[in-house]
Amino acid sequence: MARTVIAGNWKMNMTPSETKAFIETLKPMVAGKDKCDIVICAPYVDLATAVEAAKGSNIKIGAENVHFEAKGAYTGEVSCAMLKEIGCEYVIIGHSERRQYFGETDTTVNLRVKAALAAGFKVILCLGEVKEQRLAGITDEVVSMQTKLDLAEVSEDDLKNVIIAYEPVWAIGTGLTATPEQADETCGVIRDTIAVIYSSKAAKEITIQYGGSMNDKNAAELLAKKNVNGGLIGGASLVPEKFTAIVDAANA
Ligand code: PEP
């Protein structure tokens, strides 16, 4: 029931001219592969170029963050209205690099999620445990708590526009991947939490992606798991052939 979504997170990579070339290369490679939604999330300065280049294709464009205030004295920030006007449809919120390096907390993640949903975006909400939490055996408690805090005051209706990306922090950009069993189990814990705070219908319908060194080699095995409805892909989304191979695995 949950729609599979394959999303790239470019992080701080690609200039506007590189963006145009990349999307134009990717378009024919993923054309007609409609068993999943395909999203590229790019740096702010690339977004207008990406939206223009992706026109008429099955590639959707997303930002990597958004501020929760509508406007004002927030130097360096970007608002929902700004992203809307250029045609951006998705936004990543709560990525572990934002939490780790830029002081993002569950409170600010929740504010951003609510603002983005009110503005009509599809939100890719990232959460996941750090290595010490997994080693301490508290992964389930951590992801369940993050799910509750990050989605506080989000209605079941608005939840239809939320994708959760389960990203164990120890697996992001490290080359370490959660085993398919670990990914399935923890995505299952998140799904059970959604059932508790919303309903079993919402739990069945929500897309829960795995993210953390997913690539062209391991995607098929991860995506075959019942609770894994797609991937959020960093490094491998910078190479059209690798990203396409992951889209292909989702279309097999
Ligand atoms: C990410 O940026 O969300 C991510 C999962 O990165 P990588 O695939 O490089 O681990």
Image (cartoon, helix red, strand yellow):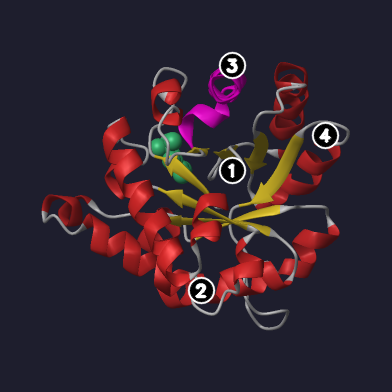
Compute the Cα span from label 4 to label 1.
Answer: 31 Å
Q: Which residue is mark 3?
A: 241
Circles 1, 2 touching at the beta carbon (< 8 Å): no
The image quadrant of residue 27 is top right
Three-letter code for the amino acid on which mark 2 is drawn: Asn
Label at residue 110: 2
Image quadrant for the N terminus? top right
Coordinates of residue 151 in the picture (x, y in percent)? 50, 71
Residue projecting furthest to the right: 56
Residue type beneath disc 4: Ala
Residue at image x 78%, y 24%? 24
Say which residue label 1 marks: 1
Report whether 188 appears left or right of 136.
right
Mark 1 element type = loop
| Residues under numbered marks 3 and 1 in contact, where contact means CB atoms less than 8 Å apart | no
The secondary element bearing badge 2 is classed as helix
What is the crowding at mark 1: few (fewer than 14 residues within 10 Å), some, or many (at least 20)?
A: few
Q: Is residue 251 magenta?
A: yes
Q: Amino acid at mark 1?
A: Met
The quarter of the picture where residue 97 lies is bottom left
- Going from N to C along the chain, the mark reached first, 4 or 3, is 4
Taking the spot 47% from the left edge, 32% from the top edge, the residue there is 235
Q: What residue is disc 4 on?
A: 53
Q: Alpha-carbon distance for marks 4 and 3?
A: 18 Å
Q: Along the line of sight, which residue is nearer the eye, 238 or 91?
A: 91
Look at the image and give the residue range highlighted in magenta. Answer: 234-252
Give the x, y percent position of residue 167: 38, 47
Q: Which mark is residue 167?
A: none
Secondary structure at badge 4 equals: helix
